[in-house]
Amino acid sequence: MNALLQLTDEQRKRGVVAFSSGNHAQGVALASKLLGVRATIVMPEGSVASKVAATKAYGAEVVMSGVTAATRDTVAREIADRTGASVVPPFDDERIITGQGTVGLEIIEEWPDVENIIVPLGGGGLLAGIAVAAGAKKVFGVEPRAGNDGEQSFRSGRIVTIEPPKTIADGARTLAIGQRNFAIIRERVRDVVSVDDDTLLDAVKFAMYRTKLVIEPTGALGIAAVLSRTLKLSGPTAIVISGGNLDFSLLCK
């Protein structure tokens, strides 16, 4: 919503185009519906069916044919060039970082004594935004091990690009962390770690069985890091659970 509110009236008339595997797609689609803006969302083939259905239900046009995780950015920008629509990136954008940083503000307002905040990491918008908003709080990022470009980047001090990762955490199948995000994460985040898919699936099941929360694997990254002791933290700790579009077939594995 933050990104669309900053568009001019003329830009809104021309519509918006976004690229995402699902969560950002739904956010842009819903915001566009509320503001009366035409939205086109580029989603890679193989996206979770429930995310595609929800995006369409909000009134957005979904483009999937021939789209992969590696090409969705390119396809979206080609559509924007052809139609005049404004591109709303999923993470490497000041408006997105600012909007997602409100999660950090809410955590601190509700729990001033919190010392640690654990955040899922894909492209880095959510982690960067929360890290800025959190001030002196200790912030940690968690990725799927098969797609740990952010962890590799954090360790090496430069952005590392990987091949499209095979992981159940579809919201974190990014190939590289955003440049704006990385600059913030290097400066403000304490550590970035990763967990394997088996551990991640256990965390999804734990959340459902023990807390009655239905969350997707990407949203369970922080829980997985704590349950597996990948992150061993002391003091009041908040875990950001972001994404509830679970592919229930995963529970049969």
Image (cartoon, helix red, strand yellow):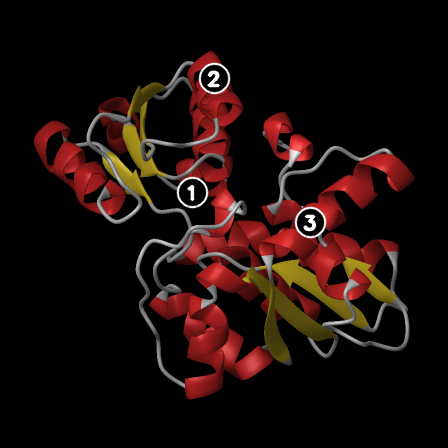
Identify which residue, 185 or 43, lies in the foreground: 43
Marks 1/2: CA–CA distance? 23 Å
Secondary structure of the residue carrying tag 1 is helix
Instruction: Say whether disc 1 or disc 2 marks the residue closer to the N-terminus.
Output: 1
Circle on res. 3 = 1
Secondary structure of the residue carrying tag 2 is helix
On-image quarter of the C terminus: top right
Circle on res. 220 = 3
Of all residues shown, which one is farthest toward the front?
253
- Residue 238: which quarter of the image? bottom right
Instruction: Say whether disc 2 or disc 3 marks the residue closer to the N-terminus.
Output: 2
Secondary structure of the residue carrying tag 3 is helix
* Residue indicated by mark 2: 53
- Residue 222: which quarter of the image? bottom right
239 relative to 148 in the view: left or right: right
Tell me the residue at 18%/45% (across/down).
Answer: 74
Of all residues shown, which one is farthest toward the bottom?
156
For mark 3, does the 10 Å Cα neighbourhood hold few (<14), some (14 to 19), or many (20 or more) residues?
Answer: many
Tell me the residue at 53%/45% (across/down).
Answer: 168
Marks 1/3: CA–CA distance? 26 Å
Do tag 2 and tag 3 residues touch (Cβ < 8 Å)?
no
